[in-house]
Amino acid sequence: MTRDKATVVVLMFNRAPLFETSVPISVFGVDRTPSGAPRFTLLPVAAEPGVLVSTGGIQLHAPNDLAALRDAGIVVVPSWRDATERPPEPALRALRDAHEGGALIVGLCMGAFVLAASGLLDGRRAATHWYHAPALAAAYPRITVDPTVLYEDDGDVVTSAGTAAGLDACLHVVRRYWGVAAATVIARRMVVPPQRGGGQAQYIDQPVPEIRDGDELGDAMEYALRNLDDGMLDVETLAAQVHLSRRTFDRRFRAATGVSPLQWLLHQRILRAQRLLENTDLPVDAVARQVGFTAAVSLRPPFRRIVGVSPQDYRLTFRITEPPRLAGIDR
């Protein structure tokens, strides 16, 4: 059976946190097509019988049952109530059947425990909230649990850390299936960053600084974004631009963002390349030069490693004939 990737099921459990439950609904359940976003069909599903009660005693009514998973191209398990409790077997069986039928399965935060109980994470790397990672690793030793990353994409299964990282994972899924422009439209309307890489740290020593005039890291980032076409641009250049030593700049950057300046710079170059491949007819060699690589041959390996396909294959999939209209802000 051919599944429509734009049909998204959200599997809802009793006593699951309200915020996590709402994350995929916020991404896939709001019509943003006037701004150029894809059109999704959202199917909220009650994963177990009875009234579903969420945070603060709020009752939820999901109008669909587990049969809806038969048509879904994406199935999201946004959370789970208790690391020590096994999820109901009918829901686990429906997840396995959907996965076998070709659906992408996504577990956000404690939703990873549901995927783990179904067996879908055996032999894979997985993410969950850092607080619950030890419990997941202890209960399911066949899973390699990474407590540091925002999300983990293992092809047909995606898992993420908690709360805001669930938004990152859902936007990553949009970016993977519909391209950077689609994810950017949704992120813009939701007023969230359009891309945080899955390898970014879950928790950092200090809050991410507001980028403003006089902010050393913000000034360095802005300088980098203005000069991505400069193949000589490197971390030493950025540090010198704000009059810091390489070591001090690297330490402050990691503390503020959770990633190294080199990782951040590479991801910005790849993100700019994706946009150029979507929105222009520039040859791949020219795209490479505009983002600081000497030629297409030097762009291809990091592009494939980060995006998963070659630049040319990416363009064939996500080429935009008319740029999407960017409307204002919504919820």
Image: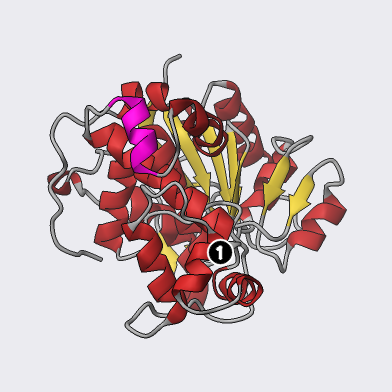
Q: From the viewer's side, name the closer residue of 290 and 120.
A: 290
Q: From the viewer's side, name the closer residue of 29 and 171.
A: 171
> Is 287 contained in the magenta span?
yes
Image quarter (top left, top right, bottom left or bottom right) of the N terminus: top left
Which residue is drawn at the image coordinates 21% and 64% (left, top)?
Answer: 330
The residue lying furthest to the bottom in this view is: 214
Q: Is residue 324 left or right of residue 235?
A: left
Which residue is drawn at the image coordinates 38% and 43% (left, top)?
Answer: 291
| Residue corresponding to mark 1 | 236
Q: Is residue 250 left or right of residue 73?
A: right
Amino acid at the residue labelled 1: Glu
**Magenta stretch bounds:** 283-291
The percent position of residue 254, horizontal first and vertical second, equals: 61, 70
Q: Is residue 208 left or right of residue 100?
A: left
The percent position of residue 141, horizontal first and vertical second, equals: 87, 46
Classify mark 1: helix, strand or loop.
Answer: helix
Give the dominant element type of the magenta stretch: helix, strand or loop. Answer: helix
Q: Is residue 180 left or right of residue 45?
A: left
In which quarter of the view is residue 318 placed? top left
> Is 70 contained in the magenta span?
no
Look at the picture and state if 104 lies above or below 256.
Answer: above
Image quarter (top left, top right, bottom left or bottom right) of the C terminus: bottom left
Which residue is drawn at the image coordinates 55% and 43% (left, top)?
Answer: 106
Look at the picture and state if 170 lies above or below 191.
Answer: above
In which quarter of the view is residue 327 placed? bottom left
Q: How many other residues sit within 10 Å of disc 1, few (<14), some (14-19) or many (≥20)?
A: some
Can see residue 305? yes
